[in-house]
Structures are given as C-alpha cells and as structure tokens.
Amino acid sequence: MGIISFQGARPKVKKQDETPIKVSDYMTQKLITFSPDQSVMEVMESLIKYKISGGPVVSKDNELLGIISEGDCIKQINESRYYNMPMENYNVEKFMAKDVDTIDGNASIFDAADKFLNSKRRRFPILEDGKLVGQISQKDVLKAALKLNGQHWRDK
C-alpha cells in the first residue's frame, strides 16, 4: 500500500522577484519642485496648498540642487523677524539644504526603511543620470509595508 497525503494541492508560491520591493516601485514621480531663485513665501504657499512638508530644489535641467522644508522656511521667518527684513527678499537658494542624501531606485524598500531609521530625513530623492526622477518618503515605505503584509519579508 502506498503513502496517502491529506495535504491536497498546494498553491504555487510566487517567485520573490515578482513581488515589487524596489524603491522605484513605490517612489513618487509627480513631484512639486522648486527653483533656487523662487521666493520662500511662494514655497510656503505651495507647502500649505499641496499639504507637503518639503520638496526638491532643481535646476532648469532637472538636476537636484537641494531640498527646502517647512523647517527651512521657519528659519527664514525667524531671520526675517530678527533682522527686520521683509520676507519677500529671501529666496530658496539661501535657505535650502544643499547636502542632500539620495537613494538608489534599485535599492530594496527594506534598505530605504533602514536608511530612514539611521537618519533624520523624511524623504530621499532618487536620481537617474544626474536628473531627479522621483522621491521616496517614510509614508511610501509604510504603504509598501502594507502591500507586502502577509508575504515573505526577505528581500533576497
């Protein structure tokens, strides 16, 4: 008599590389960007209008020059008050963060999560051939985690 199995048919397991886990799978591509010569007042209006906390500053050729955030705008408000200068006199270039940390679009979403944990950044721009192609935020990592919930959490 042979061995009888009571397990029944098993569903085929998806190959790991079929599951989207790269930063580029979850990055935001339609970004609100700013130019270095834009006024900080315009930036503040955009941050409020689009309900964002900051955005990349790019050249006319879409090269990343920096990032401007709510905190940078608050610095401008404080400086304007201290020096009794009209806020319209300040532009983005003076207040943006120029030392910008980026992440590779081919990195796994888990690498991005680790990078967020080890920095105080809320977003990382993604460059391709020196041009801005997207941005990943902490919220994007959370969205990815929800989509991947119930699947294997290994990235290799």
Image: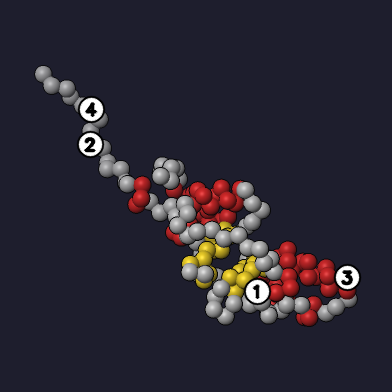
Foreground tag (4 vs 3) = 3
Q: Residues within 10 Å of mark 4 (few under 14, many from 20)?
A: few
The correct choice, above or below, for 97 with respect to 153 in the image is below
Foreground tag (1 vs 3) = 3
The residue that label 2 is drawn on is: 9
* SS category of the residue bearing label 3: helix
Query: What distance separates the C-alpha of mark 4 from that of mark 3?
Result: 78 Å
The correct choice, above or below, for 153 with respect to 66 in the image is above
The residue that label 4 is drawn on is: 6
Could you say which quadrant of the image residue 100 lies in? Answer: bottom right
Residue at the spot x=56%, y=47% of the render? 114
Residue at the spot x=62%, y=57% of the render? 122
Query: What distance separates the C-alpha of mark 2 from that of mark 4?
Result: 9 Å
Instruction: Check if mark 4's residue and mark 3's residue have beta carbons within 8 Å.
Output: no
* SS category of the residue bearing label 2: loop
Counting residues from the N terminus, which is met first, the one under dot 4 or under dot 1? Answer: 4
Counting residues from the N terminus, which is met first, the one under dot 4 or under dot 3? Answer: 4
Residue 43 can be seen, yes or no:
yes
The amino acid type found where label 3 is placed reads Tyr
The amino acid type found where label 2 is placed reads Ala
* SS category of the residue bearing label 4: loop
| Towards the viewer: 133 or 6 | 133
* SS category of the residue bearing label 1: helix
The residue that label 3 is drawn on is: 82
Residue 150 can be seen, yes or no:
no
Q: Residue 46 carries which label?
A: 1
The correct choice, above or below, for 84 with respect to 124 in the image is below
